[in-house]
């Protein structure tokens, strides 16, 4: 699809790193599947994937994680 941010690039499937900050906690997910603009680098993450990330992050924060870095695959 065409990128809605720069309106020039085309998005391509790729893997990105997503950082979520909640209060004092920072949760980093690597290898998250996303569509990435080949021009400006804007990331488009699927709604289902986003939901999964937020759920996992909430769980980690609840367990007292301050900094947690994990691969999306093992988090899912
Ligand atoms: Zn773009």
Image (cartoon, helix red, strand yellow):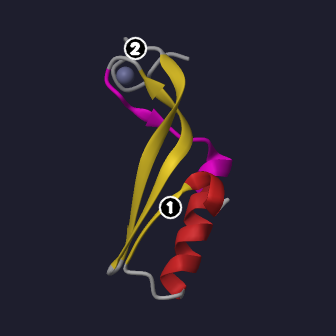
Under circle 1, the secondary element is strand
Under circle 2, the secondary element is loop
| Image location of residue 63, percent across then percent down | 53, 87
- Quarter of the rendered image showing ligand 1: top left
Residue 68, compared with residue 38, is above or below; it is below
Identify the image quadrant of residue 8: top left
* The CB of the residue at mark 2 lies under 8 Å from ligand 1: yes
Q: Alpha carbon of mark 1 to alpha carbon of mark 2: how far?
A: 29 Å
Residue at 51 percent of width and 37 percent of height: 15
From which residue to which does the magenta span run?
Answer: 40-50
Give 57 or 5, whichever is nearer the viewer.
57
Q: Nearer the viewer, mark 1 or mark 2?
A: 1
**Badge number at residue 9:** 2
Residue wearing tag 1: 70
Residue 50, compared with residue 70, is above or below; it is above
Crowdedness of circle 2 by 10 Å Cα count: few (<14), some, many (20+)?
some
């Amino acid at each position: 699809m065409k990128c809605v941010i720069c309106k020039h690039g085309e998005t391509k499937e790729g893997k990105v790193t997503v950082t979520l900050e909640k209060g004092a906690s920072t949760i980093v997910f690597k290898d998250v599947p996303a569509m990435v603009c080949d021009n400006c680098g804007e990331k488009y993450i699927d709604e289902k994937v986003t939901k999964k990330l937020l759920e996992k992050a909430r769980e980690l924060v609840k367990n007292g994680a301050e900094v947690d870095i994990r691969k999306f695959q093992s988090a899912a």
